[in-house]
Amino acid sequence: MTIKITAANERLSNLINKKLGRSHNISEQQDSELVKTQNTAKSQVKTLTNLATPTFKPGDSIQKRAARRQQLKQIRKQQNIESIFNLAIDYCPAVTSENDPDADWVERFIELAEDSSNKAMQRLWAKILAGETIRPGTFSYKSLLTLQQITQQEAQILQLATSLSGQSQLDGFNQILTGYYLKPSLFNFFTLNTKVNLNLSKAGLSYPNVLTLIDIDVLYGQEIESAELKRGEEYRLKFNETELLLKAKSDGIVLTYYKFTQTGQALCRLTNMNLNDNLKHQISELFDKHFTVQFVAIPAS
């Protein structure tokens, strides 16, 4: 079977034109048609905004008012999805893509995304569509349902949590370090204050915020412990532009952290946040006693 390699932004333009009922061939004049797609969407959004003004008359029957309300509802949904499509074009680079997004996935995406009128949330929906076009299968239907149900405030909490999380080299999932402790042994059994806690609130993520992320199925419900680290053993977390390298100075050290769920991991891809400065400072200060702490810049790809 021959696999057709096509630029992701071309695939997305073709998908959008198909959903909007346009018939021209994007692949023949890609650059000019990409611009036309953007301009047309912007023009339609402006037109739909003007149409969405209620024009009820005092003498209208309840049936007419109901019909008009449904018409305005459909116009608003169309306006929302046109805006999301337009943003998705901006987010989608000209990288290679082997397959189109699953047709059923696209239909479900539209059904869920078309109710979003908030511009910040529309940007998240657009990033999902662009990401799914680049790599089909990246975003599950469950992650779409989660995004539809969260508020803008919850989305902001998710964005903050992402800046505090690093991707583990062990399982590829993001985690938020909360501290570490020493396993009791003959040498430290009577030692006090062996538990070290990072203050996530100082970094902007309060405990109620953590509970919110757990409630919307972004984080697992309990702190997780790492395997016991031995002296000289390394633990790595990859942030956006930085890699954290922790090298144990003694035996019996256990790290604690919150781990992102499968849904949370997918939604993490929507943000591009650098490591939180306050958290970086805390790790450098509090982990120094039992770890060699290094922050290494990741070369741009």
Image (spheres, helix red, strand yellow):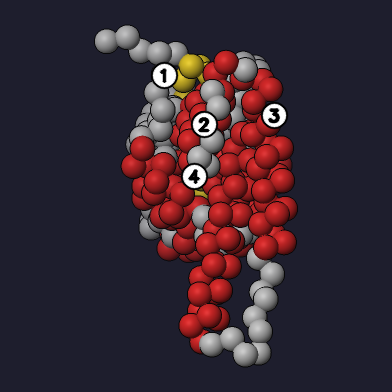
Instruction: Give the number of the disc on residue 35.
Output: 3
Please state which amino acid type lies under the numbered disc 4: Leu
Residue 10 vertical placement versus 173 (above, below): above
Q: Of circles 3 and 2, which is in front?
A: 2
In the picture, residue 238 is in which quadrant? top right
Q: Secondary structure at mark 4?
A: helix
- Distance Cα–Cα, label 1 vs label 4: 23 Å
Residue occupied by mark 1: 98
Q: Secondary structure at mark 1?
A: loop
Instruction: Give the number of the disc on residue 267.
Output: 4
Q: Earlier in the sequence, mark 4 or mark 2?
A: 2
Please state which amino acid type lies under the numbered disc 3: Val
Please state which amino acid type lies under the numbered disc 2: Ser
Observer-nearest of 236 and 49: 49
Which residue is at 54% across, 35% downward? 22
Residue occupied by mark 2: 23
Residue 145 % position (x, y): 41, 55
